[in-house]
Image (cartoon, helix red, strand yellow):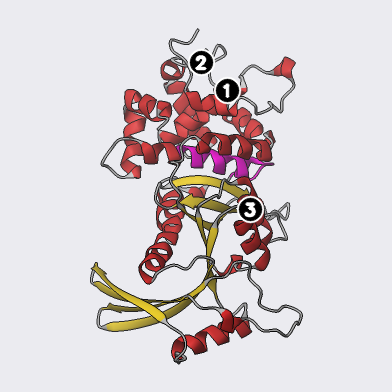
């Protein structure tokens, strides 16, 4: 019998159906999930490493579950994770992460990432591309949706949004997600949006560009400026918001007309970056369903890129996601969930060190690892 109760997060995954025949199961699904999560937190990056870690840490794992038949082989781990229903796994993840979220509304960034080595050329399988939701203030992965082959993020984003609790949040998406149907999904969920506007809406883009370049006297624009500098770089950002949008709409009905639900403001951010005596300039536009002020627009857009720096970069550099060669069945999508659970737990761990060093410490110190997997708030 285990010396202590299993970590409470396992209860959120108890509804997950074991895909194996019950009479042939030597290694219960709960034991496999606990092994995979603990090993991933502690530094294992593939199933061979997970199996090796488990073999060395059976005493630790038996603090929580019996492991009467020891540790499964890496082939067994691969087969089980490839067979688990990914939709059911995502649903379990969502129930777990909702318990971690604070009650205060957050900025939710939506963006996609490709696991580059998860392709299989012989079978014509494309690499896994996943759209993730990231709570920028709490630094939590809220959910993920795999993009179907021969499809794109436009179809996956609404599926992800409908799974999330959006009420009161502010959702940010890059230009790929600037679609009327996606905006409507956000509004229906009780949230507001800030969507990047690019040339995929050519007429609208031209109209917005013209207004900010040559401000009509009847329109009021609010502005603010920020200056940042590090590593030999100085970046000046000028943020402008227009909270009058009637000029974007027309009484004339035509196919593909501009008609975004709840549109309340249009923003522009001009950046000027000086590095090594060279100056680079950029200008970006945004559609907003809330009458933001210029300072809030600056914080929201800056926060959106946290999904690149604090999620995707961490997955690639700390969890070596781009090197993962898992290709079987639902394996890539399900391992993405395991890594997101591990990352959420590591992010919430009490430490002043980087996630990389927290992961190493968890591999060296079993008591620290136990604190991580038992942490609920």
Residue bearing mark 2: 65
In three-dimensional space, the C-alpha distance between marks 1 and 3, rounded to whole angstroms, equals: 28 Å
* Residue at x 48% of width, y 19% of height: 6
* Residue at x 57% of width, y 84% of height: 247
- Left or right, 42 with reference to 24: left
In three-dimensional space, the C-alpha distance between marks 3 and 2, rounded to whole angstroms, equals: 35 Å
Q: Which element is circle 3 on?
A: loop
- Locate residue 19, reporting x and y percent: 71, 28
Q: Can you tell which of label 1 and label 3 is closer to the viewer?
A: 1
Residue bearing mark 1: 30
* Residue at x 74% of width, y 15% of height: 23
* Stretch in magenta: 326-342
- Locate residue 48, reporting x and y percent: 52, 33
Using the rendered image of the protein, determine whether residue 286 is visible from the camera's viewpoint: no
Crowd class of label 2 (few under 14; some 14 to 19; many from 20; radius 10 Å): many
Secondary structure mostly taken by the magenta-highlighted segment of the chain: helix
Q: As displayed, is residue 80 above or below residue 218?
A: above
User: Counting residues from the N terminus, which is met first, the one under dot 1 or under dot 3?
Assistant: 1
In three-dimensional space, the C-alpha distance between marks 1 and 2, rounded to whole angstroms, equals: 8 Å
Answer with the quarter of the image where residue 305 lies.
bottom left
The tally of labels here is 3
């Amino acid at each position: 019998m285990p010396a202590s109760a299993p970590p409470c997060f396992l209860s959120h995954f108890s509804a997950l159906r074991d895909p194996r025949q019950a009479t042939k199961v030597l290694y219960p699904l709960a034991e496999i999930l606990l092994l995979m999560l603990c090993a991933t937190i502690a530094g294992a990056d593939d199933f061979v490493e997970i199996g090796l870690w488990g073999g060395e840490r059976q005493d630790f794992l038996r603090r929580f579950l019996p492991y009467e038949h020891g540790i499964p082989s890496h082939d067994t781990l691969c087969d089980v994770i490839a067979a688990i229903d990914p939709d059911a796994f995502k649903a379990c993840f969502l129930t777990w992460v909702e318990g971690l979220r604070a009650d205060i509304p957050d900025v939710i960034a939506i963006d996609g990432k490709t696991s580059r080595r998860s392709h299989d050329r012989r079978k014509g399988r494309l690499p896994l591309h996943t759209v993730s939701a990231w709570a920028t203030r709490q630094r939590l992965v809220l959910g993920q949706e795999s993009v179907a082959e021969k499809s794109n993020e436009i179809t996956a984003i609404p599926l992800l949004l409908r799974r999330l609790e959006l009420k009161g949040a502010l959702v940010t998406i890059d230009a790929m997600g600037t679609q009327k149907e996606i905006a409507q999904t956000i509004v229906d969920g009780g949230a507001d949006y800030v969507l990047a506007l690019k040339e995929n809406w050519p007429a609208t883009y031209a109209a917005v560009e013209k207004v900010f370049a040559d401000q009509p006297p009847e329109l009021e624009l609010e502005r603010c400026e920020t200056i940042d500098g590090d590593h030999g770089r100085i970046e000046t950002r000028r943020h402008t918001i227009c909270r009058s949008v009637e000029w974007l709409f027309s009484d004339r009905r035509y196919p593909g007309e501009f008609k975004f639900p709840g549109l309340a403001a249009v923003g522009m951010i001009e950046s000027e970056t000086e590095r090594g005596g060279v100056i680079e300039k950029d200008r970006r536009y945004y559609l907003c369903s809330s009458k933001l002020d210029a300072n809030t627009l600056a914080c929201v857009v800056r926060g959106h890129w946290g999904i690149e720096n604090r999620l995707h970069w961490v997955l690639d550099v700390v969890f070596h996601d781009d090197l993962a060669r898992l290709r079987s069945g639902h394996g890539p999508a399900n391992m993405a969930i395991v890594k997101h659970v591990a990352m959420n737990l590591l992010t919430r761990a009490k430490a002043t060190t980087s996630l990389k060093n927290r992961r190493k410490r968890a591999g060296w110190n079993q008591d620290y690892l136990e604190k991580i997997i038992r942490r609920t708030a």
